[in-house]
Amino acid sequence: MKQTPYPTAFSSRLFLFLTLWLLAFSTQAQKNKAAITRIDPTFWWVGMKDQNLQLLVYGPQAGTYSYSINHPGVTLVKAHKAENPNYAFLDLTIAPNTKPGSFTITGKNGNQKLTRKYELKARTQEPKGQGITSADLVYLVLPDRFSNGDPKNDKFKDMADTQANRNNPYLRHGGDIQGIQNHLNYFEELGVTALWLNPIIENNQPLTDEGGQMRSAYHGYAFTDHYQVDKRFGGNDAYKKLVQAAHAKGMKVVQDAVYNHVGINHWFIKDMPSKDWVHQFPTYTNTSHKFQPIIDPHGSKADWSIMMNGWFVPHMPDLNHDNKFVENYLIQHALWTVENFGVDAWRIDTYMYNEDQFMNRCNQALMNEYPNIHIFGESWVNNVIAQSRFTRNKIDFPFKSNQPGTLDFVLWTAMNDALNQKFGWDEGVSKVHQVLAQDAVYEEPMKLVTFMDNHDMNRYFSVVGEDFNKYKMGLTWMLTTRGIPSIYYGTEILMKNFKDPSDAEVRKDFPGGFTGDKENKFTAAGRNARENEAFNFVKTLANYRKDTPALHSGKLMQFVPQEGTYVYFRYDDQKTIMVATNTNDKEVDLKTERFAERIQGFTKAMNVLNSQTIGNLNSLKIPAKTAVVLELEK
């Protein structure tokens, strides 16, 4: 999710209404007959490594009852009453030898009694939590805008937002999970090995007025029920089927997680367990979006509080991770998601806005249960030191993060500068070299996720001025340097635009993904010559990368850029790959003697992108604005 200020003109009244909800605690519910209307997590499993489980029990007056459970292996350790009488929190332990099956939760209040069945399932042997590594290429998909596989689920009358209209960039367009699954062969051809979907959890949000324009929550970042995949995307079953189908093709799936906030229409926001379930101020307070107070040894607590506890927007309440019930709820949902759907990795939205200790506990819970899972968050910062603060690092920060990876915004900035600035001591491609030269601050820089654009940014092809040579040069860096590369949907077919007047401009429908599209760019026949050239360029390099361990997992050695040229090597005991870049506007004849440390012993090379053989490595003629990828040979 983007980390820029939002309009707040209508926010005070909305915040007042929320406060009134907090204080009233659903008076009408107290008049109704007591009942348990839901339990989260909706079900659980036997045989989990962590034997503890906290159930959120909800319903009219459900919190006024005393609870008991009588089932072999299941022990009710403690029942917590909430500030709101409609909630109870039950701490259970599940012994290792507990058998799968259902048991009854019984509540008593004098002569009154209520019951609810709860299921413990057997764990499956299907892949889950496999992780992603530098051997992968991640493809980021915005589900609503990619492909409509089932038009019957485009809109529903019983949801807060009943509209769907492809002619309106701010409304839902009908893309869904089935549409993504229908194109697994396309991803496979391109060389993609992992799919990252923008959030698919239910966003049953009303349209919001932003600057006089009514907008939907098609982006997915305003959850309203953690345990339901949005039925406009196909629901839980569709998501599970997609993960299974992807696994069958050797692909992985990355879950997009949001811990910082939920949608204003979330069921537990409408009737909150306690006043401190979310962060509140005397009047509505927006986050400052300034990361500096988090890492600043001279910073003020007031600045830290506004940054961390302020809301992103008035329709996205900011969850309070210091509330242990909130913390448990979010951690258990993370575990439930991996176990139930079988996802492999975890991308965390707005990572730096979450409480540090909560994030470490949540990360550790996932890693304890799924040792191979990869976790990488979004911390939109502008320097290496700040970025390292939010992943495993070698710096003596007062707080040590255990997050394995992070999105590499600093390298993204450097690569964009390299493509759009003239070369200089500290300008142009020198910035890429300088950023990578600081990798010593990270424990595992290969676990950083690299990218050229995403759903919150101007489209990459537009950023480079629709210069095809620059386009290829930047993608070559991303696909050959260290880290885990991620490509935004449509970049491979030159989708373009700027975020003007809104993010919707960089979230256009993928041509061919919807009924009635005049062009189908999932096929070579539907793409024009330049689009096919772009697609084949990405396909060639991505598939070579996938099949070449030296390129995706080997060591990296770079040389100081000179006169607009930049050279680095990826190598292991089997192969050496040379990447030589000319960022100038004219061809250069690059002398190679200063690269003898890596090139010595090799006499020729194969150009990976065109399969041509280079018979003399003493010098290389590199065209203007070109990066060549050479497999060195003896």
Image (tube, rainbow, N blue to C red):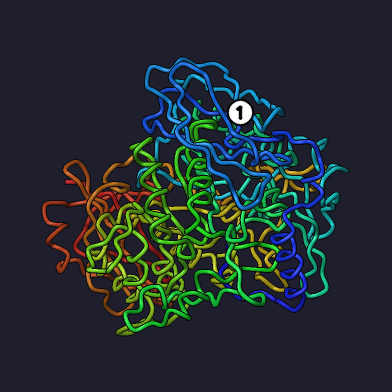
Q: Quadrant of the N terminus?
A: bottom right
**Residue bearing the label numbered 1:** 241
Residue 31, located in which quarter of the rendered image? top right
Q: Nearer the viewer, residue 140 or 215?
A: 215
Q: Residues within 10 Å of mark 1 (few under 14, many from 20)?
A: some
Residue 128 seen in this snapshot: yes
Instruction: Report the residue at 65% width, 40% height from top.
Output: 64
Q: Give above or below for 408 relative to 36.
A: below
Q: Give above or below for 100 relative to 145.
A: above
Q: Give above or below for 52 relative to 413.
A: above
Amino acid type indicated by mark 1: Lys
Left or right of 531 on screen, residue 60: right
Residue 472 seen in this snapshot: no
The residue positioned farthest toward the right in the image shown:
157
Left or right of 74 on screen, residue 184: right
Left or right of 101 on screen, residue 152: right
Instruction: Report the residue at 77% width, 73% height from top.
Output: 13
Q: Secondary structure at mark 1?
A: helix
The location of residue 255, given as percent across then percent down, is 52, 44
The location of residue 431, given as percent across then percent down, is 34, 75
